[in-house]
Image (spheres, coloured by chain):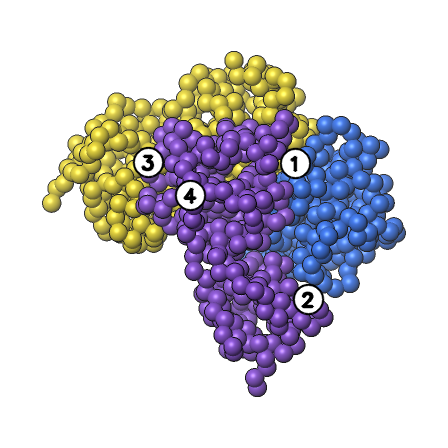
Chain colours: A yellow, B blue, C purple
Amino acid sequence: MIVGTISSMNHKPIIALITDFGTQDAYVGTMKGVLLSICPAARLVDLTHAIPPQQVRQAAYVLLTAFRHFPPETVFLVVVDPGVGTAREPVAVQTDQGVYVAPNNGVLSYVLARVQDQQAVVLDNPAYHLADVSQTFHGRDIFSPAAAHLANGVAIERLGSPADVLRLDDPTLVITAAGIHGEVLHVDHFGNVITSIGYLAWTGPDTLSLTPAFGAQQQAPITLNAAACSIVIGSRTLQPIHTTYGAVPPGTLTPLVGSSGQLEIGVNQGNAAQVLGVSPGDPVILRLANEE
Amino acid sequence: MIVGTISSMNHKPIIALITDFGTQDAYVGTMKGVLLSICPAARLVDLTHAIPPQQVRQAAYVLLTAFRHFPPETVFLVVVDPGVGTAREPVAVQTDQGVYVAPNNGVLSYVLARVQDQQAVVLDNPAYHLADVSQTFHGRDIFSPAAAHLANGVAIERLGSPADVLRLDDPTLVITAAGIHGEVLHVDHFGNVITSIGYLAWTGPDTLSLTPAFGAQQQAPITLNAAACSIVIGSRTLQPIHTTYGAVPPGTLTPLVGSSGQLEIGVNQGNAAQVLGVSPGDPVILRLANEE
Amino acid sequence: MIVGTISSMNHKPIIALITDFGTQDAYVGTMKGVLLSICPAARLVDLTHAIPPQQVRQAAYVLLTAFRHFPPETVFLVVVDPGVGTAREPVAVQTDQGVYVAPNNGVLSYVLARVQDQQAVVLDNPAYHLADVSQTFHGRDIFSPAAAHLANGVAIERLGSPADVLRLDDPTLVITAAGIHGEVLHVDHFGNVITSIGYLAWTGPDTLSLTPAFGAQQQAPITLNAAACSIVIGSRTLQPIHTTYGAVPPGTLTPLVGSSGQLEIGVNQGNAAQVLGVSPGDPVILRLANEE
């Protein structure tokens, strides 16, 4: 049982943070002061604080790329929250791979589609808030104390009322006979273009399986022929799907399966987003057969 | 007594860093190497390293936003220092809420106006410097060793000679019968415009108290009527002061009391600095009554 | 012996990271999840993640600025790797000042020219990789596990086959009778221009010694007269070499010896790279005598 593990003597819990706060202010540092005041043993890890302001789906994707690589009792503190000061609820969710503290706005959707044993509460017990809750900085006053108390081994049901159903975002993924329509989800530091089309996995030298899994919309896997597929993005049609950037010459565009299973467009030693002229929200189509 | 607490067995001191060094070089990482070499038990927290180069007052404000949320024995290492290589003195100050290591250039002014039990020294004891002090990187060679030794529980008086008076910046705050004249102090990651007008606190549904407290210039609180006040900034006159961004429709400007008590101008789900066209140093006036 | 020290009870190893991954994605955070999963006691320090993509020599320089200021058993995890997906080998090198995990592309050249007792292996033992090695993220799947196992005290020879010779970059430094020809290596956060000309050290009020030391190209020190030297960079000829920015009036350009021993051009309280209009790769000449 996770709580037992966390509260064991000498335990050094991990709290991993993801926010849209940037690092030019001390907002993140202030949250860390709260975390260490309540849970002095915590080890704090920054996932990123550079989510574009209030871009919930990009945050959901970035969290997806990281969560499996942490110990299962890790507390993930996610504060990307267009609704501060409004009625959206702060929640905590305990699973078999991570404990999550976040606004209930869909930011956990990618992860929750991939984990088990979910128990969720609304953070409505003021005993686990800071003494003075501001109306503008719930990350400091509500989310951080909850994460720190969970890291200390406080049972999740003490933090608030049960939340039976998490409200999940609708995915942008549409699957038809002709192909799979998605969008650009994220452009990474290297200019790699990550799309909402996933989860993809190689099942043979030329075959891929596709398991759509954003939020509740889980479906049976679809089998794809990597050589027959083509990807339409910007003004380009690209094929086939390769396994790595290095499979094509330097400077060349190639679709590939990214390190978290999303369809990705990269350029070997180059910047795909610049070459394609695309940014988050732009459409991308994965055609299941080559239709010249 | 703070030193006793710090030197107790098993103590895991916190050192919180704020600099204008950025994160593109290894300057901050090098300081952390020095800190952990001298104080292996230290837990290091970044407040920010993105203070605009040598902007002492913005650093003073950012430190203000964070310091109360850390344990009282935390060591704050502040290196924002236009005067490296000149005669300004490096100092350490021990208080009831934090131990501070910084250049003596006013960067501690906001915090020192709010804490007690101050004991200050100049860091002039070379036994607590690195063996080879460079002439260009005192953050590594003088400030970091001092912070690490203090975190180890070394008594502050061993680090150098007493410094009776800290030289404080003059505030830019001017209070007249017509209103309170300040300036834009900081634009945060979200475009919220934080002003030098503070410290403000709600004392009733429509009333605020204002306690000017930058450096030595402390005064008795002034009572304000939130509904009658107006704020003049850029080409706009704004009123009333609200309690949160969400009190106005998305896209709308509103004055509010920020999470550290400064007068702030925000836009619900938007960027106030862009809408107003203002940046640090621009004037702002808080009129005490509506003068149509 | 380092391994003995590392594996001792209660040891809290340091792993210091330098990458070109940026901090907008969770790539670095994911590596930290892997590091802490394998080595829960590790203390993680970011040197920088803002190396320009795939700029191996800038990474080599930034590592040089930091490595001496960490405890000698520190593990340095360096992932700046234009060759992911190609044949370059991942290596680990144990020395008397740091254990290094990096691609074998020359990124360790500056450091390895200054340390002793080198033992190097190729990371070709899959028992010390993650179970599923991707083809696009070796930082997570190969480099991080190696660093964490080394931090745990695993003997370096268990990680792979001996690597007798590390392939080192050629330096850009050319020494002639007329002067020393180098290039701009790095522009730091303050606009200071760091050059490939080093290692310089003051040996008297007016004399400097120069010890070229990039990679294998070590030479006997050359003695320079600081007052007679001039530096040609951009369209400017600058002299003499000063000891600190503050030795010249604010706004004035001056050559100096940087805090890691490289020839540097700075402006007191200003931005030298902007004033000079130079960027990495631009030529710089250190003339040994003033040739009006």
Residue drawn where x is 75% and y is 37% of the image: B152
Tags 2 and 4 on a common chain: yes
Which mark is nearer the camera, 2 or 4? 4
- Answer with left or right where residue B49 lies relative to residue B168: left
Residue under label 1, please give it: B43
Tags 1 and 4 on a common chain: no
Marks 4 and 3 in Cβ contact (< 8 Å): no
Residue at the outermost bottom position = C292
Q: In the rendered structure, which amino acid carries the disc numbered 3?
A: Gln
Residue under label 4, please give it: C163
Which mark is nearer the camera, 1 or 2? 2
Q: Chain of mark 1?
A: B
- Answer with left or right where residue C27 lies relative to residue B49: left
Q: In the rendered structure, which amino acid carries the disc numbered 2?
A: Thr
The percent position of residue B141, horizontal first and vertical second, equals 70, 53
Residue drawn where x is 25% and y is 37% of the image: A181
Tags 1 and 3 on a common chain: no
Q: Nearer the viewer, residue B10 or A168?
A: B10
Q: Secondary structure at mark 3?
A: loop
Which mark is nearer the camera, 4 or 3? 4
How far apart are the alpha carbons under marks 1 and 4? Answer: 36 Å
